[in-house]
Amino acid sequence: MQQDLREMLYNPNDDDIFIEGEGFDGEDLSGLDAIKAEFKYVHFVNCQFDGCNFDKTSFYECSFKQCVFTRCRFNDSYFRNAVISGSKLDAALFAGSHIKDCKITDSFFRYANFTKTVFERPQISGCDFTQAAMTEIKLVKPSFDADIFSGADFFKTMLKGVDMSLCEIDGIVVSDTGLELKGLKVSAVQAVELAKIMGIKIVG
């Protein structure tokens, strides 16, 4: 199946690439060049991706389960009704992407770059975004549950109305004014940690 996917992505005439209804299980799909390709109802299980380029690629109703991505790019990509579960995407590049109505569970995005990405109604649970770049992202009705954002950079990301009370947010980075934190829903313990970030000393 690996060779078949490469053949599908081969595009010497710069034509539109549309791949639908395919499944890949246990494949090494490293080095793929899928720029501007469109995937629909395509499912990947236990696949390895190394050095792949998915910039400006669209994924509709696709799933990635137990997959590992190394040195992969998804800049300006589009995900809709996609599922990512049990996967590793550490240091992946998602800048300028749009993630809409997706379910993302038990996956790793440590050091990933989501700068200026739009998250629209995502359901994200059990994921690790440690030290990820979440700068200038737009959050529309997100659902976060038991996610780790330790040391993540939320500079210029407005968190008003976002509930992170069940997440780890120690050491997150915001602007000096802390404007990003206005209206953020947190637990009492988290509020103490955020106060330290803002230089507030709690006494008594």
Image: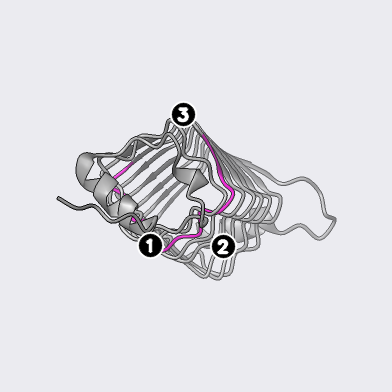
Residue at image mark 1? 151
Q: Quick one: SS at disc 1?
A: loop
Report the span colored magenta. Answer: 125-139
Q: Helix, strand, or loop for circle 3?
A: loop
Element at label 2: helix
**Any mark on residue 143, and which?**
none
Q: Earlier in the sequence, mark 3 or mark 2?
A: 2
Residue 54, image x, y percentages: 62, 56
Q: Residue at x 28, y 45 (%)?
A: 191
**According to the image, label 2 marks what residue?**
3
Is 50 covered by the magenta stretch?
no
Looking at the image, the residue that sits furthest to the left is: 204
Q: Residue furthest front?
A: 204
Q: Residues within 10 Å of mark 2 (few under 14, many from 20)?
A: few
Numbered label attached to residue 141: 3
Distance from the alpha carbon under mark 2 to that under mark 1? 40 Å
Which amino acid, by three-letter code, is at mark 2?
Answer: Gln
As measured in the structure, the alpha-carbon distance from the residue carrying label 3 to the one carrying label 1 is: 22 Å
Foreground of the two, 6 or 156: 156
- Disc 3 marks a residue whose amino acid type is Lys
Residue 76 at x, y = what percent? 66, 50
- Main SS of the magenta part reads loop
Label 3 or label 1, whichever comes before in sequence order: 3
